[in-house]
Image (cartoon, grey):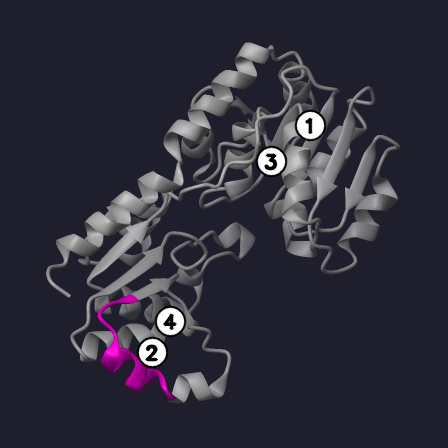
């Protein structure tokens, strides 16, 4: 339920009284009252956690658990929850380290609606996806990606994401001729780009999962990623790892990834598709709900 509309906040107690279960995405201000009221009404409360809500990365000023009072909001929500669901092992570690809750935690990876498999032989297209805004120049590795493009002039680089501030102009000011920056595109067009990409780059400082990495791998792109957050577990041990702060490291990894064979691409795709099908998440969520007893 979208709580940005005041009338819905007012009607929350009545709605929760009729509910069999409260299911919440992320422990933050928007979920404080649903969690607390659900607990007060003795309703089962499942909260999905494991991202910005439970993180504390002071060098990036990232995460609610580093905030002087919002961390107490997160802890209260987790305490009022009957169970917590994390979609990555890294997210679960963050909950255990930063929140230190006694609420049971269940690891339930995300399920992905996979894009179609692309052609095995591909032109050298290097793709990254993420909102284009100031904070993501470093956090999502967008500036490193742009600088790496100049070091691999024989490949086409493409950055796609919602342009939210002047960061796109900044990136274009340094962009070599082989880098294109494109605003957000419809899902069908995005799926087509996944199928065309030879390499997908995620040189992030923090990731709690990275849906785009899984989608790109499923379509046959080779993952070039940092070792930060959940990325190593999400992409698997055969991903190509980089120093996310060093454009030369990213460029070297891209050159290696461009040499991938059709068999390599098929292996990456199979890894993603076998680990993150929607059916697995559906099964595990139903199992978690059943474990809470009769509704």
Which residue shows up at 48% across the image and 87% down it? 6
Q: How many labels does the image show?
A: 4
Q: Is residue 104 left or right of residue 32?
A: left
Residue 150 appearing in the image = yes
Q: Which of marks 3 and 2 is nearer the N terminus?
A: 2
Nearer to us: label 3 or label 4: 4
Kind of element beneath mark 2: helix
Counting from the top left corner in percent of width and height, residue 50 is at 38, 52
Give me the disc on residue 203. Answer: 3
Q: Which of 192 and 260 is in front in this view?
A: 192
- Please tell me how crowded label 1 is: few (under 14), some (14-19), or many (20+) other residues with Cα within 10 Å: many
Q: Which of marks 3 and 1 is nearer the N terminus?
A: 1
Q: In this view, does 66 lie to the left or right of 36?
A: right
Kind of element beneath mark 4: helix
Give me the disc on residue 33. Answer: 2
Residue labelled with disc 4: 31
Kind of element beneath mark 1: helix
Nearer to us: label 4 or label 1: 1
**Residue 243, image quadrant:** top right
Q: Do the residues labelled 4 and 2 touch (CB within 8 Å)?
A: yes
Nearer to us: label 2 or label 1: 1
């Amino acid at each position: 339920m979208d709580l940005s509309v005041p009338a819905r906040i007012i009607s929350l107690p009545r709605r929760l009284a009729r509910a069999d279960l409260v299911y919440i995405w992320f422990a933050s201000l928007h979920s404080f009252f649903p969690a607390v009221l659900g607990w007060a009404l003795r309703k089962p409360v499942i909260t999905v956690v494991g991202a910005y809500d439970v993180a504390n990365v002071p060098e990036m000023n990232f995460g609610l658990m580093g905030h002087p009072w919002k961390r107490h909001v997160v802890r209260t929500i987790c305490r009022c929850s009957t169970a917590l669901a994390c979609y990555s092992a890294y997210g679960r570690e963050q909950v255990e380290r930063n929140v230190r809750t006694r609420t049971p935690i269940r690891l339930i990876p995300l399920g992905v609606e996979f894009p179609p498999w692309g052609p095995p032989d591909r032109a050298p297209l290097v793709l990254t996806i993420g909102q284009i805004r100031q904070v993501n120049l470093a956090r999502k590795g967008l500036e490193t990606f742009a600088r790496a493009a100049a070091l691999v002039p024989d490949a086409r680089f493409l950055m796609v994401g919602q342009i939210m501030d002047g960061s796109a102009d900044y990136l274009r000011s340094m962009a070599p001729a082989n880098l294109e920056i494109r605003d957000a595109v419809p899902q069908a067009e995005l799926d087509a780009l996944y199928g065309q990409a030879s390499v997908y780059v995620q040189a992030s400082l923090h990731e709690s999962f990275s849906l785009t990495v899984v989608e790109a791998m499923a379509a046959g792109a080779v993952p070039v990623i940092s070792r930060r957050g959940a990325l190593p577990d999400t992409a698997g041990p055969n991903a190509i790892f980089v120093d996310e702060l060093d454009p030369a490291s990213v460029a070297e990894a891209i050159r290696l990834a461009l040499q991938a064979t059709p068999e390599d691409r098929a292996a990456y795709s199979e890894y993603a598709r076998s680990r993150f099908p929607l059916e697995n998440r559906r099964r595990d969520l139903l199992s978690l709900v059943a474990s809470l007893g009769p509704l």
